[in-house]
Image: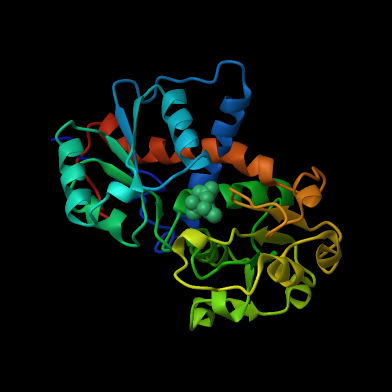
Amino acid sequence: MATLGLRPHDSGFPHRHLLGIEGLSADQISFLLDLSESYVALSRSEQKKTDLLRGRTVINLFFESSTRTRTSFELAGKRLGADVINMSVAWSSIKKGETLIDTAMTLNAMHPDVLVVRHPDSGAVKLLSEKVNGAIINAGDGSHEHPTQALLDALTIRRRKGRLAGLTVAICGDILHSRVARSNVHLLSTMGARVRLVAPPTLLPTAIERMGVEVFFDMRKALEGCDIVMMLRLQTERMHGSFVPSIREYFRFYGLDREKLSAAKDDALVMHPGPMNRGVEIDSELADDIDRSLIREQVEMGVAVRMACLDVLTRSLRRNEPPGDST
Ligand code: NCD
């Protein structure tokens, strides 16, 4: 039966799955970012395809809606020469737990080499990784982690600022429900950046300071001296009850506009993982300002990072090596 994995001495990435950023070392993160750089170059060339993953099968299994993550995993797999299958499961039809495992076992019987999984429940992707033979990539599990988003954010920042260490990054908005924030906090802290979180008290997890971040409720104070301002969407689909008084009020205090951005460094850059709600968490004109906004570049980096992840998680299989670390 096909199992994937790398032994620690084989490469800079010893894990069998990519379930989160937590637990990855700075060297492993740098290794993935360096490899992604080569895929940026390939994706910008006329001939965008290699046959590295020829004969391999990648299944995208999405229990939640997605535009850029699913499309970029599909493109990444195809550019590496793999066969890519997309399975979207309407979230209303999920019977939690039982259906997830049943679906996973059905797909497992078809011998996929990599399963890319998005699920509304935190921890569901890890559970699945214990049941299948192929490598699992977490494409977002509930409000837990979204590792490839943090990697593509880091690649985007590193290319523009030349480094991650020593930068001050403010992550603003709905931190409570955000897997993007959590993965970014792990990654940026591991790489030596300073992380500030800014949100209304209702949208901050309790005891978040334990993650080694600074917490602010005042956006202007939070943005003072920042190199990067990362905005997050209000994730109403995960909210049970009312977390903000009104959208107008939210934008007034926590929406990013030029006036608030002026508190950051003169060369501060703006990011957003998408999908964005213009006029809710970010001013529309600022989002489109190519001198300040990295939003489109983030999308481009997403394909390169996902190619790098598919590459490393299938390396030992391509060399017919036994599985490594099962994490
Ligand atoms: C994010 C997600 O799904 O967690 N989007 C993405 O992957 N680009 C953020 C969000 O949905 O707001």
Q: Name the residue nearer the viewer: 10 or 324.
A: 324
The furthest residue to the top: 47
Q: Is 49 above or below relative to 3?
A: above
Q: Left or right: 49 with respect to 138?
A: right
Q: Image check: 85 left or right of 160? A: left
Q: Residue furthest bottom?
A: 207
Q: Quadrant of the N terminus?
A: top left
Please tell me which residue lies in front, 277 or 144.
Answer: 277
Quadrant where the image shows the C terminus? bottom left
Residue 35 appears in the rendering = no
* Side of 250 where 81 appears, left or right: left
Q: Is residue 277 visible?
A: yes
From this view, report whether residue 198 is shown above or below residue 292: below
Q: Position of residue 131 (x, y in %)?
A: 17, 50
35 and 247: which is toward the camera: 247
Residue at (60% x, 40% y) in the render: 299
Visual colour scheme:
rainbow
**Depth check, front residue: 165 or 266:** 266
Question: Residue 222, percent across and down?
Answer: 73, 74
Q: Is residue 327 above or below residue 111?
A: below
Image location of residue 196, percent across then percent down: 64, 72
Q: Residue at x 43, y 31 (%)?
A: 74
Quarter residue 104 falls in: top left
Q: How far from the left and from the top, in percent, is residue 54?
A: 34, 21
Q: Quadrant of residue 88?
A: top left
Q: What residue appears at the point 81 percent right and 45 percent down from the top-left corner?
A: 289
Q: Answer above or below: position of 51 versus 97.
A: above
Residue shown at 43% from the left, 63% from the top: 143
